[in-house]
């Protein structure tokens, strides 16, 4: 039911649309939402109690996707303006209620983090200003701010001296990094730069940026190009290879060891083989916090190999990068300072709202390889940030990163990160001790993998031949998938699942639960409850029936 | 000065950081900003009076970029957490005060629009939910909502029947479009699809997506690839050619006619030449609302040529697309319904905050050419939107587009669009009547170009030889640049400038003012004042001195 005041305060009278006048329309730009209107009240509710809003307004029981789709199935563009209050009622009932409470303490399945309260009013300032970072004429102070944010991140990764930053931070001919909408575009940007740097203009060749890949290859004499990464590389690397015209099958996958880290010997062999085959190594990509396992590749060893083969060394630290803010754990990323480029997402472990990825470059001239200009903006020598970004128009998200850096501070991040790693270790301990679960990845940072395997089945697996193991694992895979869906449907807690090769099972892929520890509100009690819930789900009739297939 | 209540309500005591505890940190996630805190008060101020906030808080006098940079020059990551109130004071003084008031009625220089009030509380809901649209597990109802928004936009462009939308809207094997962070990524996506569709898998060839461009070309027998667009094409097309590995010099530029529209005869000649030279035409790109002039290419004629040469026909309607919502002006885009793909930005003429571009495809199978999967998300057959997007993790901006569609409605947009076109025509009339201004582009939509040329100089230009014209125009170019900077610096009003070839001056490029009519608050009086201000600036001593060079 719409209340009367809301009706008065709303902007359109849909019943008198024949008279929809310019004057009525002006009101949406000039008359604020009244605090007691439907939308105004919800605004206040969120501001006063974010967690309460999310907990109360999102229903926990899963509504079928089909039923949700029915609410969004009209393909006709709305002809007649709708009351704001009416629309708000719709949004609350149909959209908000059936969103995902990604910041619930028991939602530990994806890289979703809760937001600090200060992000809400600061986001409003950002939206209200509606700056466009592509050019200084529509962003002004936001431009130096973004360059500072990139400089601070650069400093965390590369720790150059203050003279370096004085020279580079606001130098229009230099760029310490590029601000992106996310980690995927950051990875694409890094490999775009690597590709163009590999084929710079020379005599009789205007460079790959101008002439394209086919001519670049012909000119260089290479037979083809390759991007080398462990089999745990993020799927965005395959997408980047596609987008950049290199081809997905030219992402060369290197096996991992028992700890899910790239096998350095295999990496060197792979590079040697590529060299022998006259295939140019565009980039070697190290992973710092693998999406599936959270593991960090041996970056120092990889940097050595990249140097040996003269390849661009990129580190995908979209997830794990903020670990550098913890003096306790930063050593785990040793070698990242030797990378030519590093991706770090702010909307992950930096607790910034969705839409903030960054890539920093060791060499402040590197982004010159993708520089571009236009007559009405991005003029050469200008400070327009759009010269060095894959995106054009884009919002002032850097402001929220700047805010988080200052209000949380390195020490604040350190506390959060250390706690997350500790909790992952504790959870791994619980899993290991529980007779009916198998720990698959002992966490290095704050992601881990495990599965439900009743004690008796574990014993069977241990004594089985590799052929028998495979048969048992096939049954367990089905069980893992089913349990994950059942847990999600019950709506109380959420873990995700993935599937990757296991050295302990002869390199065969196995489906596992995946847990990401990033919510400071997640407690040991939450984790204990999740394991208990999973054990209970595992004991359901349907699941026992699946397990029974192992004996038959 | 920080007030006491703010001090109490803020989250960190930076003086006792040695004891910065987990408990203190939790508070940033659990304790809301108090309404009477520094940040809380600003939040209320924006909600109650957005225009007042922007007008009062942004200073009009330009501070030098150098001075602004000094406020953002510390490259050290902040070690110690800062009070929220302290940080807020900084943001207000150093960032907000020196942002750009892009929604001021006199800011008519770029494609920046004011935001309707309802966008503020709705943005807060979006940020609070912090959904990630890459996969359904972190977005749920947002996924069908985004598909609906893309379907509605598709309907506006292609007007297919309801059976078509019933079949496609929520079909996981189909996609009517891709939601992007902006028009650049939308254009890249369109050309990425066109490229991969051109080189699909065949016998002995796994397709360009897998094998890369070099092998695709070798397999096809083409010597090279080309993207064909008028010389007014947006700079993102060159960037797309670079990113996609095609090469910037393979964007083939076609001359425009006196109206700044693509010369259709030249387009056909160009295509015929490319064909003769065995160069594959990857795409012909039509412009619907050129960034510099607002002109719309003859899309129907271009569609014919695209058909004739079997090329993908893309229309960059990032700016002009919403014109389709006006029954008065939609005929100007006739032929857009024959395009294979169309880019439309919501953060431009759809009045949505920055960060919302879209590309729709005529064929709902087209995006299959860039489809990709991963083990833990985007599984084949899932409804995860990330399968078809160049970005990975991304925010629920589609919600704000959905809101604008419903609350403004087609009729509401029609009123705004018609008014903007009318105002552009009126402004063109004023310029034409004014003895000291030269109208360069008679607006077709709502963008126009002109320059300051005192009557006496205009007379001289008319009677000059082409060599003399060139000399005069060189002086005028310097004047235009200088005047534009002076106007910007005075901070009252803003027009941008650009430079492009003029048929009337023998095809030589000339610098001009550029005006974009998109703010419903801009009135005829605003426009009159802008012209008056410019005439006054033109009469300043320094500028008269430049003009005097014409006589010497």
Image (tube, coloured by chain):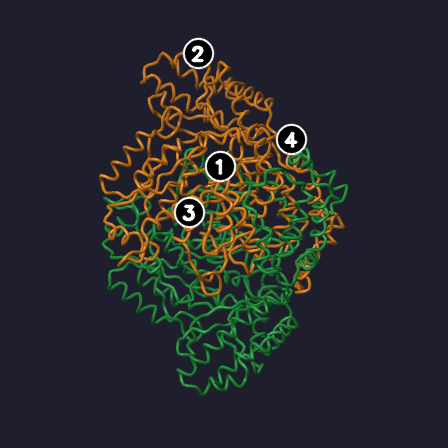
Chain colours: A green, B orange
Q: CA distance from mark 1 to mark 2?
A: 40 Å
Q: Where's residue B188, x and y in %?
A: 41, 46
Tell me, yes or no, whether dots 2 and 3 are on the same chain. yes
Residue drawn at point x = 73 percent, y = 43 percent: A37
In depth, the one of A539 and B218 nearer the eye is A539
Q: Which residue is mark 2?
A: B456
- What subunit carries mark 1? B
In the rendered view, does A95 fall on the left or right side of A342? right
Q: Secondary structure at mark 4?
A: helix
Q: CA distance from mark 2 to mark 4?
A: 50 Å
Image vertical order of residue A299 relative to residue A360, above or below:
below
Camera-near label (1 vs 4) is 4
The circle drawn on residue B56 is none
Residue drawn at point x = 52 percent, y = 73 percent: A480
Q: Secondary structure at mark 1?
A: helix
Camera-near label (1 vs 3) is 3
Tell me, yes or no, whether dots 2 and 4 are on the same chain. no
N-term-proximal mark, 1 vs 3: 1
Q: CA distance from mark 2 to mark 3?
A: 56 Å
The circle drawn on residue A18 is 4
Q: Determine whether label 3 and label 4 are within 8 Å by CB.
A: no
Q: CA distance from mark 1 to mark 3?
A: 18 Å
Image vertical order of residue A198 relative to residue A273, above or below:
above
Crowding at mark 4 (Cα within 10 Å: few <14, some 14-19, many 20+): few
Q: Where's residue A318, x and y in %?
A: 49, 59
Camera-near label (2 vs 4) is 4
Q: Where's residue A264, x and y in %?
A: 37, 70
N-term-proximal mark, 2 vs 3: 3
Tell me, yes or no, whether dots 3 and 4 are on the same chain. no
The circle drawn on residue B363 is 3
Do we see residue B488 in this rendering?
Answer: no
In depth, the one of A207 and A106 nearer the eye is A106
């Amino acid at each position: 039911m719409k209340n009367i005041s809301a009706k008065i305060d709303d902007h359109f009278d849909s019943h008198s649309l024949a008279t929809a006048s310019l004057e009525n329309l002006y009101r949406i730009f000039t008359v604020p939402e009244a605090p007691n209107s439907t939308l105004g009240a919800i605004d206040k509710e969120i501001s006063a109690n974010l967690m309460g809003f999310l907990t109360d307004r999102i229903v926990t029981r899963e509504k079928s996707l089909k039923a949700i789709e029915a609410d969004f199935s009209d393909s006709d563009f709305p002809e007649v303006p709708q009351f704001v209050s009416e629309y708000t009622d719709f949004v609350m009932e149909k959209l908000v209620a059936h969103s995902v409470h990604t910041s619930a303490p028991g939602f530990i399945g994806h890289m979703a983090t809760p937001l600090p309260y200060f992000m809400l009013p600061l986001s409003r300032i950002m939206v209200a200003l509606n700056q466009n970072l592509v050019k200084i004429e529509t962003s002004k102070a936001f431009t130096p701010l973004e360059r500072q944010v990139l400089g601070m991140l650069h400093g965390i990764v590369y720790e150059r001296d203050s003279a370096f930053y004085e020279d580079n931070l606001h130098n229009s001919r230099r760029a310490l990094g590029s601000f992106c909408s996310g980690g995927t575009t950051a990875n694409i940007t890094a490999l775009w730069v690597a590709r163009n740097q590999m084929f710079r203009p020379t005599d009789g060749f205007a460079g790959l940026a101008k002439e394209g890949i086919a001519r670049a290859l012909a000119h260089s004499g290479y037979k083809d190009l390759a991007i080398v990464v462990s089999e745990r590389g993020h799927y965005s690397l395959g997408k980047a290879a596609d987008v950049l015209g290199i081809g997905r099958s030219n992402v060369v996958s290197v096996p991992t060891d028992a700890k899910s880290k790239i096998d350095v010997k295999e990496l060197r062999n792979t590079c040697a083989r590529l060299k022998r085959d006259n295939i140019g190594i565009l980039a070697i990509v190290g992973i710092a916090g693998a999406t599936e396992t959270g593991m960090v590749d041996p970056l120092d060893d990889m940097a050595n190999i990249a140097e040996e083969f003269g390849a661009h060394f990129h580190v995908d630290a979209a997830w794990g990068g903020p670990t550098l803010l913890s003096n306790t754990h930063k050593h785990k990323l040793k070698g990242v300072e030797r990378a030519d480029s590093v991706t770090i997402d702010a909307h992950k472990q930096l607790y910034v709202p969705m839409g903030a990825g960054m890539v920093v470059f060791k060499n402040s001239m590197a982004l010159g390889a993708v520089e571009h200009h236009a007559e009405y903006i991005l003029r050469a020598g200008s400070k327009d940030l759009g010269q060095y970004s894959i995106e054009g128009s884009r919002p002032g998200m850097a402001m929220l990163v700047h805010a988080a850096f200052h209000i949380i501070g390195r020490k604040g991040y350190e506390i959060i990160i250390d706690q997350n790693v500790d909790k992952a270790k504790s959870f791994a301990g619980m899993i290991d001790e529980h007779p009916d679960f198998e720990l698959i990845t002992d966490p290095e940072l704050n992601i881990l993998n495990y599965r439900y395997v009743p004690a008796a089945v574990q014993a069977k697996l241990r004594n089985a031949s590799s052929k028998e193991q495979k048969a048992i694992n096939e049954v367990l895979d089905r069980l893992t998938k089913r349990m994950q869906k059942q847990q999600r449907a019950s709506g109380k807690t959420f873990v995700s699942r993935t599937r990757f090769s296991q050295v302990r099972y002869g390199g065969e892929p196995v489906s596992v639960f995946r847990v990401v520890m990033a919510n400071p509100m997640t407690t040991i009690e939450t984790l204990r409850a999740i394991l208990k819930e999973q054990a209970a789900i595992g004991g359901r009739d349907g699941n026992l029936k699946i397990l029974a297939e192992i004996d038959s």
